[in-house]
Image: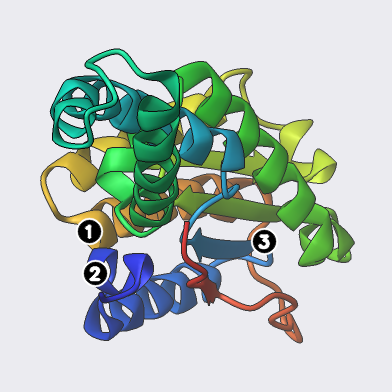
Amino acid sequence: MKRLVERFLPQSEQQKIESCIREAESRTRGEIMVLVEASSYHYPVADLRAAAALAFPIALALTPFWGGLFWAGPSNLWIFMGTLIPLFLVFHAIVKHVPPLKRIFISDMEMEAEVQEAAEIQFYKKGVYRTREETGVLIYVSVFERKVRVLGDRGLNARIPEGYWKDIVATIVPGFRKGRPAESICQAVARISDVLEEKFPVRMGDKDELKNLIVEDRRA
């Protein structure tokens, strides 16, 4: 099975994003990083929920058949448990490798919380907060959850309207639904660069302080 990010954002699309970030940063001393991650979290409880939800009714339906076959009666508890446990283990293994099925058993609230936490961790882990003028921006994309977070450093946040980053997120997400993630990310980068150019125009000797694109393709 191809990895999540590879399917979501092929190499050619990754190159488009890197190119649009380079162009954007040529006009400003602000810094933009796009980080695309396969999943913000591995959601082990969802694997258990899914395995139980799938295995239980099947085991319940098969128990009378196995009970009759082995003359143990249609409601034998040991027959039921002997059917349920193998089914649970099989479905538990399957769900781990079928992301669309796994997502059914994760609440949107749970995904929102995990994506927010992962974005904040990556903001500091990848050094977005370390730019000289505190003008770093992280566009964090979590493919499994199909969610985006945009975080700006305090030097920039102090000079933009409240709620601006939510507007940027709203620019990106529709492109995911249409199958054009690179296009929507580049549109967001262009909007961010307009603000960065206005507030922090480029100067002689400006250096690129952050990687433009980071892809982490671990499985969900």
Which one is closest to the eye, mark 2 or mark 1? Answer: 2
Identify the amino acid type marked 2.
Arg
- Numbered mark located on residue 183 in the image: 1
Colouring scheme applied when the structure was drawn: rainbow
| Closer to the camera in the image, 97 or 85 | 85
Q: Residues within 10 Å of mark 2 (few under 14, many from 20)?
A: few
Note whether residue 172 is visible.
no
What is the total number of numbered labels drawn onto the structure image? 3
Q: State the image coordinates of residue 69 (x, y, percent, origin top left).
A: 14, 35
Q: Is residue 160 above or below residue 101?
A: above
Q: State the image coordinates of residue 216 (x, y, percent, origin top left).
A: 54, 72
The residue depicted at 36 percent of the width and 48 percent of the height is 95
- Numbered mark located on residue 30 in the image: 3
Identify the amino acid type marked 3.
Gly
- Numbered mark located on residue 48 in the image: none
Q: Which residue is mark 2?
A: 7
Distance of label 1 from label 3 (alpha carbons): 21 Å
Q: State the image coordinates of residue 11 (x, y, percent, origin top left).
A: 29, 84
Quarter holding the N terminus is bottom left
2 or 3: tag closer to the N-terminus: 2
